[in-house]
Amino acid sequence: MLSGRTPLGWLQLTHSTSRFVVASAGVGFAVMLVFMQLGFMNMLFDATVTIHKKFFADLVVMSGSAKGIVPDSGSFSRRRLVQAAGVDGVAGFAEVYIGTLSWTKPSDGTVGQIVVFGVPTDQRVFNDPDLDAKMPSLRVLNSFLVDEGSRGDFTTFFGKIKAGDQPTVKLGGQTATAVGTFKFGASFGTEAIAIVSTETFLHLVPTRPAGVINMGLITVSPGVDAQGLADTITAVMGPTEVKVWTMSGFIGLTRDILRVESPIAIVFSFGVIVGLFVGAVIVVQILSSDVQDHLSEYATFKAIGFSNRFLLGIVLEQSAILTLAGYFPALLISLGLYRVVGAAVSMSMSMTFDRIALVFGLTAVMCAVAGSIAMRRIYSADPAEVF
């Protein structure tokens, strides 16, 4: 369609430099808006499951009503975890207590909320060897480790801890001592995270019975299929009170729940649609104006025998040029904005190859559809009427 002829689409677009720049900027704005909406939405998903990936476990035992670790973990009886650990193929298990407590922020003295994980100090609970090495320091009652990714200006507080000092804060209404740091990173559901021993957790939350836990971690014996063992445990215990997932399955479940049920995900998805609509409107206006300005030339082509297919090729050439001219600058700008936003909210906002390809495809379709809409005037043009 386009090969072997003068690049009329390119020549028409670049004939008016200002119009070409405005059109490219319009497409770029739409592309940037789509990138940012997808980035925010996936940052929500990624941040929500960041904590999941920090735990050392092949299988996860949770309440049947659980939708994630924070804040919808639910609770269940510890004896159910012990029952699950008795199934052949289980190499080890550990219980995790989860609660949201008030704490006095060391940055400004205001009271905020902090998610606290109570874990055993004599078992491997986390994937991070450095964090595991700090577990013995939690055996002192009311000592805790604090997440360096917590939102807020805690530079002085963290500096004291790393210098060997042990500053104290009010945690759950009691005085607690910070004995170290770790790095999880904040999420949309948490401002700060602390890790304490099981004994400290029960001391900070005296209303919590020791036999009621929020999460069970199970490691599988070598050579045992994790999914098969999860199914076996579920069959033994029944799926009513608790559920058993592989860690990857639980991560997928949490992301799917967010994608389907979260109003934030719906808002961001709508933002993507709005961005594409805005871009399409801009391209339609630019191309329609160009078609109108060159209607006599298009009519001449039709009069001497060129088909609508040939003329469509010219407009689609313009659409392809606008796609490239708007997409790549917007991609570079979006990469910079991802870094800025991620640093500002202390969360990872990463650009993936799949997202790059998806947005390029959406942009190409958007411009092609807009070009086809702009072509309607050419289809109906009668050379006799034009002249």
Image (cartoon, rainbow, N blue to C red):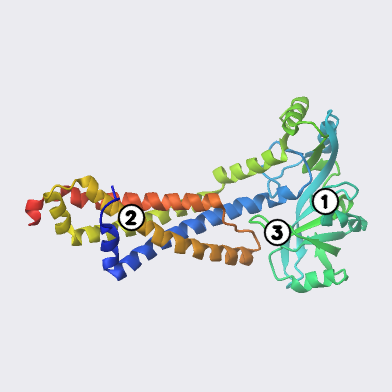
Left or right: where does residue 324 sit relative to residue 234? Answer: left
Residue farthest along the top direction in this orientation: 235
Q: Nearer the viewer, residue 289 or 156?
A: 289
Quarter location, residue 82: top right
Q: Tell me residue 270's x, y (percent).
A: 46, 51
**Dot 1: few (<14), some (14–19), or many (≥20) neighbours within 10 Å?**
many
* Residue 16 appearing in the image: yes
Of badges 1 and 3, nearer the viewer stands 3
- Amino acid at pointer 2: Ser
Q: Are marks 1 and 3 in contact (CB under 8 Å)?
A: no
Left or right: where does residue 217 sit relative to residue 275? Answer: right
Please give the residue where the numbered disc 3 appears in the rendered image.
Answer: 185
Quarter location, residue 19: bottom left
Image: 286 above or below 221: below
Q: Which quadrant is the C terminus positioned in?
A: bottom left
Q: Nearer the viewer, residue 260 or 346?
A: 346
Mark number displayed over residue 118: 1
Residue depicted at 82% across the width and 67% down the height: 169
